[in-house]
Image (cartoon, grey):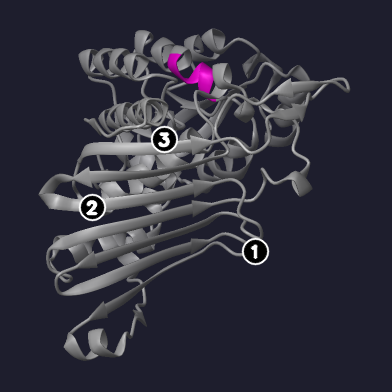
Amino acid sequence: MEENKIRVGSVGLGGIWTGVHEPGIRRSPNLELVAICDIDEAKLRAAGEKYGIPPERRFVDYHDLIACRDVDAVDICTSNDAHFKIAMAAVEAGKPYDLEKPITLTAEEADILEKATEEKKLKNMICFSYRFKASARYARDLIAQGKIGKVYHVDMQYFQAWGLPRANTPLVWRYVKERTGSGALGDLGCHALDLVRFVTGKEYTHIVGHTGTYIKERKRLHGDDMGKVDVDDFCNYMADMEDDISSSFQITRFAFGRGNYQRMEIYGSNGAIVYTLDEQGEDIDEIQVCSGDINADAHVFTKLPIPEKYKVDQMQSFADLLLDQGDGLAATIQDGQKNQHVVDAILESAEKGRWLEL
């Protein structure tokens, strides 16, 4: 690794890589994409030609990319079922990694990965990407500074629409349990769990959940036959948190008109904060605050300008972490581990129909 220049090898060249990781690597003055890997050889060849990766550093087997001497750090953007084995291979090779969420399919795997990473003292980042939204970071600081007093309740929504019948989405891997672990919960709900925990600075203590599937079968990617959907299309859950905070969550991929929409309302003894993100058309995140008796009585929320210091980039944050210049706010393997334990508890609660202690 050259001074202040980290050579990255990316595994998994799907939408999250082309939309977030690759552009972020390209923007960073400290990261250089030197190797790529994907099991789809046509996609691999096309990406190699587009991004100038020579054939000798285009790999079908992730073991070969990790073993490549030109790769300093591993960027993992595959389907969920491959996260654990690829991250473990990076750990065994002694290479730092960033990893898409959820980190594993089960809490048991998460425990193994966390232990192995810690034993090697490897730097790592889990890509809970909404931690890098400026409004979320600003809200976090306002709460930590006591601007809204004691937090009583948090209500969190995360809505998308691509599951609706009108979208005609086939049986992609996100609808298959053995590949994804869970549906809307693991796709969107884990982000919501992390964001509320990040903004409040508090852990979950008890949880109860409900999940459901609207469309039971979808057309297979190849052929005309139908395949079973065995994960959730939506999930609703409530959680108790430290300091007697009550939280509630609504998560769905069946929200007509929504692209990638989040709304988090945080209510305290002396004020309230509303965070919203709407990536329909433009990537816009903002916060509104209500504080003081006059505003409270008039039910007035005021949009706040976001200070520049809160505007950060996910992949640059990974570079900063590797260069010992991180701000300590990026999610780590411990955050991913805790998240997976809560996700598993929600699924268990939904099956048993009762509250669970975490």
Whether label 1 touches label 3, CB < 8 Å: no
Label 3 SS: loop
Q: Residues within 10 Å of mark 2 (few under 14, many from 20)?
A: some
Look at the image and tell me whether residue 323 can be seen: no
Residue 5 is labelled as 3
Name the spot of residue 324 as percent of width and height, x first. 25, 37
Name the spot of residue 21 as percent of width and height, x first. 53, 39
Report the magenta residues as a range.
80-84
Q: Nearer the viewer, residue 260 or 354?
A: 354
Whether label 3 touches label 2, CB < 8 Å: no
Q: Amino acid at mark 3?
A: Lys
Foreground tag (2 vs 1): 2
Q: Nearer the viewer, residue 168 or 348?
A: 348
Q: Amino acid at mark 1?
A: Gly
Residue where numbered disc 2 is placed:
246
Q: Residues within 10 Å of mark 3 (few under 14, many from 20)?
A: some
Label 1 SS: loop
